[in-house]
Amino acid sequence: MMFISYIGILISLIITLPNVIYFILPVRNRPVGLCRNSKIFNAFEIVGRVLCIASPVFSGFKFNSASLNIWFWLMSGCIVAYYCLWFRYVFGNMEFNLLYKPIFKISVPMAVFLILAFIFAGLWIGSKFIICSALIFGIGHYANSIFIYEQCTPHQKTDSPAEISSAQ
């Protein structure tokens, strides 16, 4: 029998709440002609997102009996980092590129911290279902985010040392 976890509801809300910003504050300077990734990655992302939001809610009493271990602190750190990236987006004039811009050499950090927050939530309470949900979501969301980021980032040609010396 499944029990609704109020702590699970709170965790799902805390992790997904910043996404409301995207709908309230419209993105600026979205590149024209962005195309979607493959249907398989889109399906993984959609199914995984629903599972990630729902699985903590129906986790029963696992959250109630969980101790504040390393996984809790890692989950909390990822949530804080995720919120900081949303603040960067909002205070960066809602520029589209800020949704995907790397930080500390982490590609698409908003996707990475969101995925890790769900994985660490599952590890915190020992829920294989939450972990699997996060991995399904992670495959789709990360692949789609990288795909969009690569479309938005001009691949600049770097000059080889031979080209530099011949130009001098």
Image: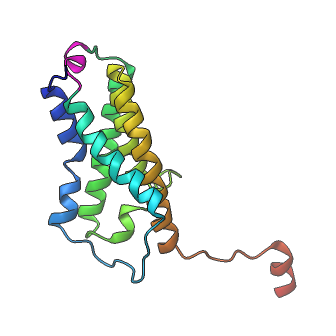
- Judge whether residue 74 can be spotted in this image: no
Return the x and y of residue 144 as percentages of the image width and height.
45, 60
From the image, which quarter does the N terminus lie in? Answer: top left
Residue at 22 percent of width and 38 percent of height: 12
Does 60 lie within the magenta span? yes
**Residue 146 coordinates in the image, percent (x, y):** 49, 60
Q: Is residue 163 above or below residue 71?
A: below
Residue drawn at (70%, 74%) of the image? 158
Viewport quadrant of the C terminus: bottom right
Q: Is residue 100 above or below residue 68?
A: below
Measured as percent of width and height from the top left, residue 165 is found at 85, 80
Specify the color scheme: rainbow
Residue at the spot x=40%, y=31% of the render? 131
Name the residue: 34% across, 70% down: 96
Frontmost residue, 42 versus 14: 42
The image quadrant of residue 90 is: bottom left
Q: Nearer the viewer, residue 30 or 156?
A: 30
- Is residue 143 visible in this depiction of the protein? yes
The answer to whether residue 16 is above or below residue 42 is above
Where 84 sits versus 129, above or below?
below
Side of 156 relative to 53 (left or right): right
User: How many labels, in total?
Assistant: 0
Most distant residue in the bottom direction: 167
Q: x%, y% of residue 19? A: 23, 55
Residue 156 inside the magenta-drawn segment: no
Stretch in magenta? 59-65
